[in-house]
Image (cartoon, rainbow, N blue to C red):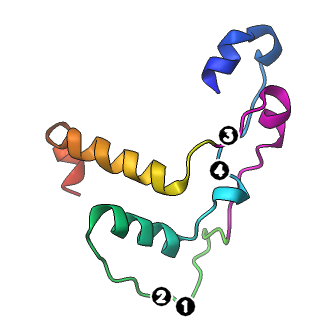
Amino acid sequence: MLILQLQDVKRHNGQIYNVGGGRPVSLSLRELTGLCQEVTGRRIDITQVPQNRPADIRIYLTDNAKVTAAAGWTPQKTPLEIITEIYDWIRADETILERVLKY
């Protein structure tokens, strides 16, 4: 999206766009955990917490309508592709990220 904005600065100057996956690539936390387990080959147990906390958000979906109308942008990668890229980046730069990854 940044490249599209830079190619037509006048049109996009001062605009605010929501850029995210939207409903087509939305995941629950359980689904995300499953994909992470698939990519990493590691498993973690998930337990259900029956009560909601005051700040819990039941669902969040980004509305891409404005950016799609203005620039034709839509998500191009699947959740699996994104998670795999993040995992590969972390593995490739593990020594640089070591302080963060310890937590």
Q: Is residue 38 above or below residue 4?
A: below
Tell me the residue that label 3 is attached to.
19
Tell me the residue that label 4 is attached to.
21
Q: Earlier in the sequence, mark 4 or mark 2?
A: 4
At label 3, the amino acid type is: Val
User: What residue range appears in magenta?
Assistant: 59-75
Q: Earlier in the sequence, mark 1 or mark 3?
A: 3
- For the residues labelled 2 and 1, the Cα–Cα distance comes to 6 Å
Residue 103 lies left or right of residue 80; in this view the side is left
Residue contact at pointers 1 and 4, CB within 8 angstroms: no
- Mark 3, other Cα within 10 Å: few <14 / some 14–19 / many ≥20: some
Q: Residue furthest left?
A: 95
Q: Which mark is residue 50?
A: 1
| Element type at mark 4 | loop
Q: Nearer the viewer, residue 79 or 51?
A: 79
Q: Nearer the viewer, residue 40 or 28?
A: 40
Q: Which marked residue is nearer to the observer: mark 1 or mark 3?
A: 3
Tell me the residue that label 2 is attached to.
48
Residue 23 lies left or right of residue 77; in this view the side is right
Q: Is residue 56 above or below residue 23?
A: below
Is residue 68 on the magenta stretch? yes
Residue contact at pointers 2 and 1, CB within 8 angstroms: yes
Q: Residue at x 78, y 34 (%)?
A: 67
Residue contact at pointers 1 and 3, CB within 8 angstroms: no
Location of the N terminus (image quadrant): top right
